[in-house]
């Protein structure tokens, strides 16, 4: 990708394109933003960081027109604006790329990019989106197939579609909410090159993230949020991980992955035994085992089959061949209902589409798999359900701590907390956790890691999937490397480094066995 950026003068680069002053916002009577002042300038990458519930995504959605501020003022190019919608924000040069991408899966790349801005003649579209996309791609250099269905694209390529949508609408400020949360390291690097190009093209990129390493490596300025208030906005160059963490949580602590529980004896029969599993979703002859009290990681690139294996074991996707045995009993036509009855918990990768009912409040989302605890003879006891929800939300610190709060209005991290809290009431015998700490803050991640270790310590088998390799290596006893829907290798996670695993994952030959050259335990210091 070698597009020619537009140069900005120093005065243009320093000018505030969007200015927020005294912004306040409440949901259901709970204050989520108070007196927020921040400027976003042309030609910069501006990070917004903070714990879940700190208000960073709410700031982004106010700028993008998705929420209306209750207090304060917004200026765009020096002119004050009132309440405005996402469409009006786009007309003002502001676009937002949500953490959960807002694309139409069954439309092509070209049709998604120009949806709503098609060329038409007398009300009939001209159908020239493919030609327009090729011309646009001459600027972007993304190399996407205009006619490919979005449903067939990887997450990284779908993000490119979103970025092209913003550029097609001549967006001068692009808000990216946790854009790297589902990407591999290679895809993150590519995304960052795109963001740098956008900055050098004279645009402002607002980068909402938990990834502190990305902030330090990529961004020009950073705004730190805490408890709905702006702690400070500063240049990134003098900041460190410690100073950013201290600003976010008020103390210079960093996340530490807890010690994994003792390794179970290989003589213990597995709680999960998968043999020669094949599915229409791309799994081919997959065999794995998880013992009680053992944490086993699935390691691979996006598209390697990790999530497909998790869904097949839980019964969300049908099997073509192979067998699944849980606690010594073989599944016959596995299904989510059967899995839950057998004590299998599943936290899916996509919390919004696969894990939560966004039309319902927190209370029924938490009690969904525990109806027998809050009902009698089929009649729901709302008091018991409320008490259960209160206990579970307190356990993970869901914000707001209101069992009747609407999950759809929560931040991504707090939605993830609700999904995880669902399984803390009754301890499962097998927990399948697909990206359990995706998009959560430092303290919540620490609690999630503790939860994983607690589950294994109490005898549950844990199958762990995470895009952060150090998280898997820090928590798991063993790991399976996946590539192309197959198991490529098995490793001992207690005796390798990230570099070792990446070499094996990419099948790089070395003169010595990389798995035997680094006996020390994997380090885990990211705050993510």
Image: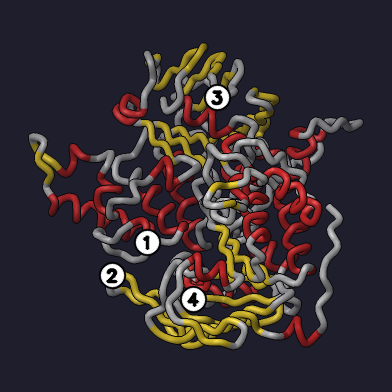
Q: Is residue 299 visible?
A: no
The answer to whether marks 4 and 2 mark residues whose Cβ atoms lie closer than 8 Å is no
Question: What's the distance in space between the residues labelled 3 and 2, CA to CA?
Answer: 41 Å
- Mark number, residue 281: 3
State the residue at coordinates (72%, 74%).
44
In the image, residue 377 lies at what x, y percent? 8, 34
Q: Which residue is mark 4?
A: 226
Q: Residues within 10 Å of mark 3 (few under 14, many from 20)?
A: some
Answer yes or no: is residue 513 visible. yes
Give above or below for 323 relative to 52.
above
Q: Earlier in the sequence, mark 1 or mark 2?
A: 2
- Decide: is 523 above or below 167: above
Q: Residue at x 54, y 44 (%)?
A: 260
Relative depth, front residue between 298 and 63: 63
Judge left or right: residue 471 versus residue 418.
Answer: right
Packing grade of label 1 (10 A; few <14, some 14-19, many >=20) is: some
Q: Which residue is mark 1?
A: 409
Please name the residue that numbered disc 2 is placed on.
28
Residue depicted at 59% across the width and 52% down the height: 120
Mark found first going from the N terminus, 4 or 2: 2
Q: Earlier in the sequence, mark 1 or mark 3?
A: 3
- Helix, strand or loop at label 3? It is loop
């Amino acid at each position: 990708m070698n597009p020619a950026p537009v140069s900005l003068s120093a005065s243009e680069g320093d000018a505030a394109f969007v200015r927020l002053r005294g912004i306040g916002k409440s949901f259901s009577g709970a204050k989520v933003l108070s007196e927020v002042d921040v400027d976003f300038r042309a030609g910069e990458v501006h990070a917004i960081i903070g714990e879940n519930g700190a208000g960073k995504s709410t700031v982004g959605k106010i700028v993008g027109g998705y929420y209306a501020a209750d207090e304060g003022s917004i200026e765009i190019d020096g002119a004050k604006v009132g309440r405005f919608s996402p469409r009006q924000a786009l007309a003002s040069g502001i676009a937002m790329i949500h953490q959960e991408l807002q694309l139409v899966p069954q439309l092509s790349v070209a049709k998604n990019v120009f949806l709503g801005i098609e060329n038409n003649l007398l009300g009939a579209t001209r159908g020239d989106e493919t030609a327009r996309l090729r011309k646009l791609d001459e600027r972007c250099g993304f190399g996407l197939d205009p006619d490919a269905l979005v449903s067939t694209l990887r997450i990284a390529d779908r993000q490119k579609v979103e970025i092209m949508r913003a550029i097609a609408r001549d967006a001068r400020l692009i808000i990216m909410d946790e854009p790297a949360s589902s990407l591999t390291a290679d895809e993150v690097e590519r995304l960052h090159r795109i963001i740098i190009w956008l900055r050098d093209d004279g645009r402002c990129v607002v980068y909402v993230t938990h990834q502190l390493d990305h902030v330090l490596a990529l961004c020009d300025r950073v705004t730190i949020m805490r408890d709905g208030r702006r702690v400070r906005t500063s240049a990134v160059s003098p900041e460190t991980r410690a100073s950013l963490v201290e600003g976010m949580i008020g103390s210079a602590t960093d996340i530490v992955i807890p010690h994994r529980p003792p390794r179970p004896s290989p003589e213990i029969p597995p709680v999960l035994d998968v043999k020669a599993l094949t599915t229409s979703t791309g799994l081919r002859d997959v065999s794995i085992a998880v013992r009680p009290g053992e944490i086993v990681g699935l390691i691979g690139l996006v598209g390697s089959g990790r999530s497909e294996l998790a869904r097949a074991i839980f019964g969300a996707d049908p099997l073509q061949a192979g067998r699944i045995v849980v606690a010594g009993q073989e599944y016959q036509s596995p299904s989510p209902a059967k899995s839950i009855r057998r004590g299998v918990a599943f936290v899916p990768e996509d919390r919004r589409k696969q894990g939560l009912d966004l039309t319902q409040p927190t209370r029924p989302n938490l009690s969904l798999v525990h109806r027998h605890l809050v009902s009698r003879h089929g009649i729901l006891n709302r008091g018991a359900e409320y008490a259960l929800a209160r206990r579970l939300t307190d356990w993970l610190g869901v914000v707001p701590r209101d069992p009747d709060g609407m999950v759809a209005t929560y931040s991504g991290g707090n939605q993830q907390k609700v999904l995880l809290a669902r399984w803390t009431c009754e301890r499962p015998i097998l927990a399948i956790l697909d990206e359990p700490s995706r998009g959560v803050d430092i303290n919540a991640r620490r609690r999630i890691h503790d939860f994983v270790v607690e589950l294994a310590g109490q005898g549950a088998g844990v199958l762990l999937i995470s895009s952060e390799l150090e998280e898997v290596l820090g928590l798991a006893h063993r790991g399976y490397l996946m590539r192309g829907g197959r198991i490529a290798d098995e490793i001992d996670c207690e005796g390798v480094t990230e570099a070792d695993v990446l070499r094996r994952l990419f099948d790089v030959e070395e003169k010595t066995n990389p798995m035997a050259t680094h006996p020390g335990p994997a380090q885990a210091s990211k705050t993510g």
